[in-house]
Amino acid sequence: MNYNEMTERAHSNAVKHGFWDKKQSNEHCLMLVITEIAEMVEADRKNDKAGVGAKLLMRQDMEKGEMFDDVFESHVKNTVEDEFADTAIRLFDLAGALGIDFSKMNPCRYYRAFAKFSFTENAFALCKGLSRDVIGIEKRIQFGIFYIREWAKSLDIDLDWHIAQKMRYNENRPIRHNKAY
């Protein structure tokens, strides 16, 4: 996954859907990232997971002629994997709004033994890292994307696939997804 390409795609789609009609503060945007993390925790609490079979089920349903949005909603939407994708997309969107060029940044060198911590503890650590205002916003966003990718990998979640599906789904949604902001 090319971070700069993802940044452009996520931010462009958010602009088209009215999320940037008014410039928002970094704190506002990070809070929306944190709400996605909270939704991820709620999906985990409900054991709402797409699982490894989601790709096959979606392909089969689409081959039967079902519409992508309907298939996505029935197999992926609001699952743990979907909320991982939402978290990454929001971070990429904020990176786009700030004009972050990941190719000019040093690689993130954070390490966490995700398996040694509970789901909620891993989620809290992500929120803590994103909220550390003594660290520049660019590095916090880079940390967040790196963290969510590594955490997803530790859970055998194909984050790239889930991001691609969610971005496709988001392309056809109404302005601000029918929300105030």
Image: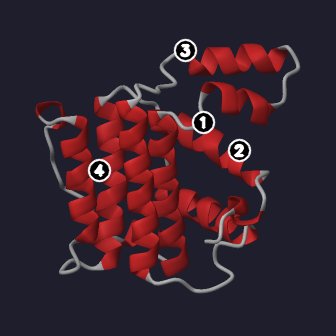
Looking at numbered disc 3 in the image, what kind of residue is underneath it?
A: Gly
Mark 3 residue element: loop
Residue at position x 57%, y 59% in the image = 5
Mark sitting earlier along the chain (3/1): 3
Number of marks drawn: 4
Assess whether mark 1 and mark 2 are in contact (beta carbons under 8 angstroms): yes
Looking at numbered disc 1 in the image, what kind of residue is underneath it?
A: Lys
Q: Residues within 10 Å of mark 2 (few under 14, many from 20)?
A: some
Q: Nearer the viewer, residue 157 or 29?
A: 29
Q: Position of residue 42 (x, y in %)?
A: 40, 40
* Number of the label disc, if any, that sits on residue 169: 2
Residue 46 placement, left or right of 168: left
The reply to whether residue 101 is visible in this rendering is no
Mark 1 residue element: loop
The Cα atoms of the two marked residues, 3 and 2, are separated by: 19 Å
Against 129, residue 96 (above or below) is below
Q: Nearer the viewer, mark 3 or mark 1?
A: 1
* Number of the label disc, if any, that sits on residue 53: 3
Mark sitting earlier along the chain (2/1): 1
Q: Which residue is mark 1?
A: 77
* Number of the label disc, if any, that sits on residue 147: 4
* Number of the label disc, if any, that sits on residue 26: none
Against 32, residue 1 (above or below) is above
Residue 123 placement, left or right of 59: left
Looking at numbered disc 2 in the image, what kind of residue is underneath it?
A: Tyr
